[in-house]
Image (tube, helix red, strand yellow):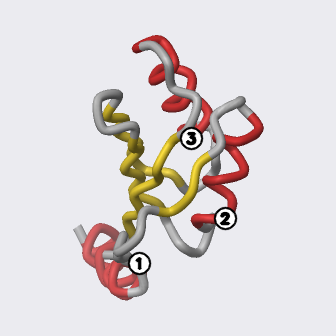
C-alpha cells in the first residue's frame, strides 16, 4: 500500500509536465482517389509524436494532432510530401 502511494506521488508531477497536444490542418495536393487518403494517413502516423491523423478526401485536408516536443508542422508537411502528396498548413489553422 505504501509503495503504491509513493508511486502515485512520484507520477503526479510528471502528469503536470505533460505537453498539451497541438493540432494543425494541412491542405493536401495530389489526392485523386480515396486510396490516397490511406497513404497520407499512414505517412503521418509514422511521424514520431503524431497522436491522430484524420484525412478528409472531399475537402483535401488532413487534421493532425501532435506533440510539439516531438514533431512540428514542417515535419508533417515533409512526411506527406515524401509520400507524394505535397501539403501546406491551412491558413488560420491554429494550434490547440
Horizontal placement of 56 versus 75: left or right? Answer: left
Mark 3 and 2 residues: CB-CB less than 8 Å, in contact?
no
Q: N-terminal of the two: label 3 or label 1? A: 1
Residue under label 3, please give it: 44
Which quadrant of the figure contains the C terminus? bottom left
Which residue is painted at 58% across and 29% down in the image? 30
Mark nearest the camera among 3 and 2 is 2
Residues packed near mark 1 inside 10 Å, few (<14), some (14 to 19) or many (20 plus): few
Badge 3 density bin: few <14, some 14–19, many ≥20, Cα 10 Å = many
- Looking at the image, residue 10 sits to the left or right of residue 8; the answer is right
Q: Residue at x 41, y 42 (%)?
A: 53
Q: Along the line of sight, which residue is nearer the eye, 69 or 18? A: 69
Please report the residue visible at 69 percent of the width from the left and 44 percent of the height from the top: 79
Mark 1 — residue?
18
Residue that numbered label 2 is attached to: 74
Tag 2 or tag 3, which sits nearer the N-term? 3
SS assignment at label 1: loop
Task: Report which quarter residue 42 is drawn in.
Answer: top right
| Depth check, front residue: 19 or 72 | 72
Residue 35, position as x, y percentages in the image: 47, 11
Q: Of marks 1 and 2, which one's residue comes earlier in the chain?
A: 1
Image height of 20 relative to 71, above or below: below
Amino acid at each position: 500500500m505504501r509503495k503504491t502511494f509513493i508511486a502515485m506521488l512520484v507520477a503526479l508531477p510528471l502528469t503536470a509536465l505533460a505537453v498539451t497536444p497541438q493540432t494543425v490542418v494541412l491542405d493536401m495536393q495530389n489526392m485523386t482517389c480515396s486510396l490516397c487518403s490511406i497513404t497520407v494517413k499512414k505517412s503521418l502516423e509514422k511521424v514520431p509524436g503524431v497522436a491522430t491523423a484524420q484525412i478528409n478526401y472531399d475537402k483535401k485536408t488532413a487534421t493532425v494532432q501532435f506533440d510539439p516536443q516531438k514533431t512540428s508542422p514542417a515535419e508533417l508537411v515533409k512526411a506527406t510530401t515524401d509520400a507524394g502528396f505535397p501539403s501546406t498548413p491551412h491558413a488560420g489553422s491554429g494550434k490547440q
